[in-house]
Amino acid sequence: MSSVDTTIQLIRAGKAEGTVCTPDLAEGPWVFDRQIEPSYGPGSSMGDIIPAGSPRQGQLPEEYRTASTQQLADRIHAAKQTLGERVVVLCHFYQRDEVVQFADFVGDSFQLANAARSTPAAEAIVFCGVHFMAETADILAGPPQSVILPNLAAGCSMADMADIDSVEECWQQLADLYGSAPDAQGRVPVIPVTYMNSSAALKGFCGDHGGIVCTSSNAATVLAWAFERGQRVLFFPDQHLGRNTAKAMGVPLERMPMWNPRKPLGGNSDVALADARVILWHGFCSVHKRFTVGQIATARAEFPEVTVLVHPECPMEVVDAADAAGSTDFIGKTIAAATDPTTFAIGTEINMVNRLAAQYPQHTIFSLDPVVCPCSTMYRIHPGYLAWVLEALVRGVVLNQITVPEPVAARARIALERMLAAQPGASTASADVIGD
Ligand code: SF4
């Protein structure tokens, strides 16, 4: 079987030296639930600082920690069979195969939130992804449905890089600088745009302030929507998606200052901010930050015909050096559409790359990064946690429910609905206007 568990077996056999970012991946995630000083745990985000107060996961009961892989699989199958249509299991593309095998739907965060909405018969939605995804599912789910995150410590280091207090402080500083008066075209000084990978509080903030949500699939459409209504955009939390998208639309780099929330005016001068078209929050995904131009050069040297596909959360230099950049959906569809045997080097999370390689044996598909380093927080969802929450549901007990307070959810829905209504090409904000 591919995915992280193959790596875990290699680590345990002493055959993984130099091929993984940390041997700690061989530990059960519950080892890290017990940490007095919480961290994101092994994987790409292990060097990131987790905010104080991040959700913690209590200790998983011993019977789930000590059960074999087969025992857990049998228990999950049995619980799902008993629950029938009362439960739906959603798995993100980046989830390990040992969990994905139990999925009713596999997709990106927005596809999964929509899958939750399209299964009203399910009383419980078990979301095998990370915290912000479960929040979005709860925002869009029907009122009687419970959204469950099997391990509460499955956050997202990128989403955590923009918190509501820091964004509100930034907003106040921008309001002091720009005022609130629209320009001659009726455009307000700033439109906030949040990536789907953000807390419900930030989606609600955008709903409140004339802003909008975007995904990696529709970021250009959403930016065009925002430029039609605002003189500039405050984009959070992922600087790379914001920069890559705006650059492709013709916004010059010098008009995209970065906002560091730990510095006054984000570390910028009044002049730089006055001229800004997109203010980029200082956030990033530690999975996609690992990809480099050097890795692309190595792949091209070894396979001169290689097609390099990367996610737009990768740094700009990597996106520029790739053959194409796009969302997980784009990467999957591009490979599915290739009729002749093709070599693909991919810049996205390793579980998805390994799954694509297994799914399309007629192609040669590999990760640009030679070191296996999965998303730290997706890794936290182990079959043991899935068995635990499903068997509790069989007993009528809802564990690890994710609930977004209705006032926040209502405001977040406004920003999400604006995104759904924004149509490609509907905006008159062309690249020329954007780069003015
Ligand atoms: S891959 Fe990156 S953005 Fe996605 S959940 Fe992991 S840390 Fe967050």
Image (cartoon, grey):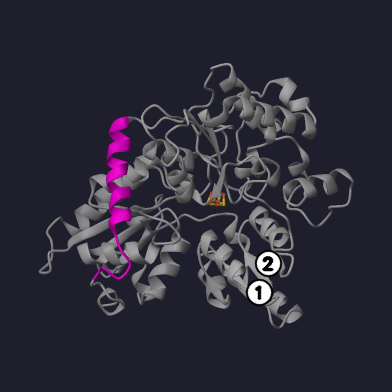
Of 150 and 288, which appears nearest the observer? 150
Q: Which residues are magenta?
A: 406-427
Instruction: Mark 2 and mark 1 in contact? Answer it, CB < 8 Å.
Output: yes
| Residue 409, magenta (yes or no) | yes
Taking the spot 74% from the left edge, 43% from the top edge, the residue there is 25
Please indicate, yes or no, whether residue 270 appears anywhere in the rendered image: no
Left or right: residue 104 versus residue 235 is right
> How much space separates mark 2 and mark 1, taking CA atoms?
7 Å
Please indicate, yes or no, whether residue 28 appears anywhere in the rendered image: yes
Q: Amino acid at mark 2?
A: Leu
Q: How many marks?
A: 2
Residue 385 in percent (x, y) is at: 64, 30
Residue 85 in percent (x, y) is at: 53, 31
Mark 2 Cα within 10 Å, few/some/many (few <14, many 20+)?
many
Of 187 and 256, which appears nearest the observer? 187
| Residue 241, magenta (yes or no) | no
